[in-house]
Image (tube, rainbow, N blue to C red):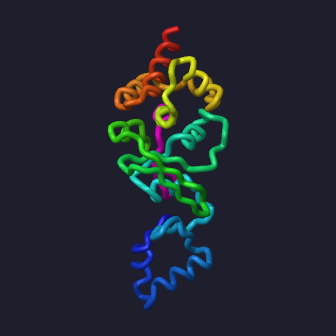
Amino acid sequence: MILTNNMIKENLKEYSNPNTKICREIKKGNLIKIVNGLYETDSSVDGYLLAGSIYGPSYLSFDFALSYYGLIPEKVTAFTSATCNKKRKKVYNNQFGTYLYRDVPEKVYPLGIKLVEEGNYSYQIATPEKALCDKLYTLSPLKNMKELENVLFNDLRIDMDEFNKLNLQDIEEISNSYNSSNVNLLYRYIRRKENE
């Protein structure tokens, strides 16, 4: 369970020095520091469940989400998330893993996000379509569909079966809000493949 400093101190208000008690609980392993002022009580919790609490608003996306959906074969070691209006990338490290945050445009931020509940935790994650669009947004502009195809299937090693399941209408909606030539190229590429 995720606890804030204030929540813990509220439970320890009978103690003359709650901070000392918090330090003891950390040493015993009953509290694990996630970031300043934020703790976890379960040392075995999956790290992705904490990503939205560490820095936000944010949702899991980019490489982590692509791996989560089986679009790329690699197991991703960092928890990658999208933010908006933060103006700079952020990195956090703790015993649960490495957390990377980067901006996407404000207009596209709310599109293609799912809220998932898992036990006592909830998190936001991009749909497969949004995760791929977010990833392409981070890359240097691609010149044409041949270059896009090479990036998708050789560089990123996107699984063709999973790629063919992507929803064209969702990508169209996202591409209309993204001001990204790569995302527009993806939409045109999938539309062309569907019409072949």
Location of residue 27 in the rendering, given as x and y in whole percent from the top left corner: 61, 79
Location of residue 3 in the rendering, given as x and y in whole percent from the top left corner: 46, 68
Residue placed furthest toward the top: 196
Which residue is found at the position 56% from the left and 50% from the top? Answer: 79
Location of residue 63 in the rendering, given as x and y in whole percent from the top left corner: 57, 41
Location of residue 55 in the rendering, given as x and y in whole percent from the top left corner: 44, 56
* Nearer to the camera, 196 or 93: 93
Which residue is found at the position 49% from the left and 46% from the top? Answer: 60
**In this rendering, does residue 2 appear at all?**
yes
**In this rendering, does residue 161 appear at all?**
no
Which residue is found at the position 43% from the left and 73% from the top? Answer: 5
Image vertical order of residue 81 relative to residue 152, above or below: below
Image vertical order of residue 69 relative to residue 51, above or below: above
- Quadrant hosting residue 10: bottom left
Residue 161 painted magenta: no
Residue placed furthest toward the left: 107
The count of marks equals 0
Residue 126 painted magenta: yes
Asked whether, in this view, residue 47 is left or right of residue 170, the answer is right
Segment tinted magenta in the rendering: 117-130
Which residue is found at the position 52% from the left and 40% from the top? Answer: 62
Image vertical order of residue 3 relative to residue 124, above or below: below
